[in-house]
Image (cartoon, helix red, strand yellow):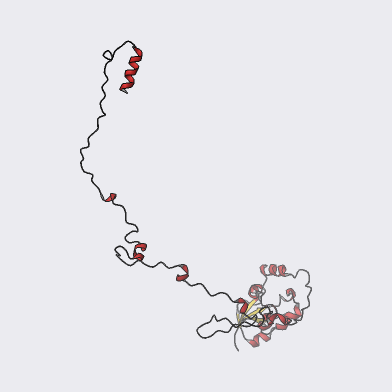
C-alpha cells in the first residue's frame, strides 16, 4: 500500500524528489491477547460411544460392559405361529369330518373327487301337498282383523282368565263356540274363523283340542300370540 501511494505522489509532482515526499510508516495490526492460557474440556466434548453402552448391538457383539440382559425381540411369527394351510379341497361335501382324540380340527382324508355335490342336493325334495287357496269374504282380510281387535269388541267371551282342563276344552268345538289350545294357552277362535287365510274348515280341525302340533307343521313362523292376543281365554291345566 505504501509503494502505491509513493508512485501516485510521484505522478502528481514529476519534479519532486524523494526528500519532498513524506514517508509512510505502516505497523502490523494489533493482536488481542487472550488471558486464558488453558482450554477447559467438559463432558460434552467427549464423543459418544458407538454402539451405545447398553444397546442390543453391543450386547450381541460381547463388547463393552453389559449391565443387564437385553430382552429378545420376537417377530410376529414367533409370537403366534401362523395357522395351518386351509385344506378345503380335502373336505367331502355332506360328510362330517372325523376328529381324533385331542385334535378336534383333524382334516378328513381326501375323497376321490372333491367336486361332487353333497348328497343332500342330489336327492329331489319331498313333495308337499299344496294347500288350496281360500277366497275370503270381503272385509275379512288381515287389516280387517287388526281393526276388529282394536274396536274394543269382546272376543274372549269370558270376564277373567280361566284354568281350562282338557274336558272343558272339548265342550267348545262348534262354529258358534270354538276354543283351541296352542302352547298351553287357550284361545277363543270363534270370531277368527272367517278371517283365517286357510279357511274355516281348516281351522275347525283344532276346535275343542290342542292344535300346537298342527300349527307348527303348517305355519310355525306366524306370531300366534300377537294374532290372537285379544282372544285369550286361559291356560291349560290337567284334569
Q: Residue 161, located in which quarter of the rendered image?
A: bottom right
User: In the rendered image of this protein, does residue 206 appear above or below residue 25?
Assistant: below
Q: Is residue 207 left or right of residue 236?
A: right
Which residue occupies 71% across, 75% down? 192
Which residue is most to the top? 15
Of residues 37 and 156, which is closer to you in this image?
A: 37
* Residue 88 location, quadrant: bottom right
What percent of the width, then of the height, locates residue 231?
Answer: 66, 75
Q: Total marks drawn?
A: 0
Q: Nearer the viewer, residue 83 or 49?
A: 49
* Residue 200 in view: yes
Q: Quadrant of residue 144?
A: bottom right
Q: Residue at x 45, y 67 (%)?
A: 75
Q: Going by the image, does 181 lie left or right of 45?
A: right
Residue at 73% x, 73% y is 195
User: Residue 131 at what x, y percent from top left?
Assistant: 76, 79
Most foreground residue, 189 or 24:
24
Q: Position of residue 17 (x, y in %)?
A: 29, 13
Quadrant (top left, top right, bottom left, bottom right) of the C terminus: bottom right
Residue 174 visible to an observer of this rendering: no
Q: Where the N terminus falls, by quadrant?
A: top left
Q: Residue at x 35, y 13 (%)?
A: 12
Return the residue found at the far bottom. Answer: 239
**Left or right of 169: which side holds 197?**
right
Amino acid at each position: 500500500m505504501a509503494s502505491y501511494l509513493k508512485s501516485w505522489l510521484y505522478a502528481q509532482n514529476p519534479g519532486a524528489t524523494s526528500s519532498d515526499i513524506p514517508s509512510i510508516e505502516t505497523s502490523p495490526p494489533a493482536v488481542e491477547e487472550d488471558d486464558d492460557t488453558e482450554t477447559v474440556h467438559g463432558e460434552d466434548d467427549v464423543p459418544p460411544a458407538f454402539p451405545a453402552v447398553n444397546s442390543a448391538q453391543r450386547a450381541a457383539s460381547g463388547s463393552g460392559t453389559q449391565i443387564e440382559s437385553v430382552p429378545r425381540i420376537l417377530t410376529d411369527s414367533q409370537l403366534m405361529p401362523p395357522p395351518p394351510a386351509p385344506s378345503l379341497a380335502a373336505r367331502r361335501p355332506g360328510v362330517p369330518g372325523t376328529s381324533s382324540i385331542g385334535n378336534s380340527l383333524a382334516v378328513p382324508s381326501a375323497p376321490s373327487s372333491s367336486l361332487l355335490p353333497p348328497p343332500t342336493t342330489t336327492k329331489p325334495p319331498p313333495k308337499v301337498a299344496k294347500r288350496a287357496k281360500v277366497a275370503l269374504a270381503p272385509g275379512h282380510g288381515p287389516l280387517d282383523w287388526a281393526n276388529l281387535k282394536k274396536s274394543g269388541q269382546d272376543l274372549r267371551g269370558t270376564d277373567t282368565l280361566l284354568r281350562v282342563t282338557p274336558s272343558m276344552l272339548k265342550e267348545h268345538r262348534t262354529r258358534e263356540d270354538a276354543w283351541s289350545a296352542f302352547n298351553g294357552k287357550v284361545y277363543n277362535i270363534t270370531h277368527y274363523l272367517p278371517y283365517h287365510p286357510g279357511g274355516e274348515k281348516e281351522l275347525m280341525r283344532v276346535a275343542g283340542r290342542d292344535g300346537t302340533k298342527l300349527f307348527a307343521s303348517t305355519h310355525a313362523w306366524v306370531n300366534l300370540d300377537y294374532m290372537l292376543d285379544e282372544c285369550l281365554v286361559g291356560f291349560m291345566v290337567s284334569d
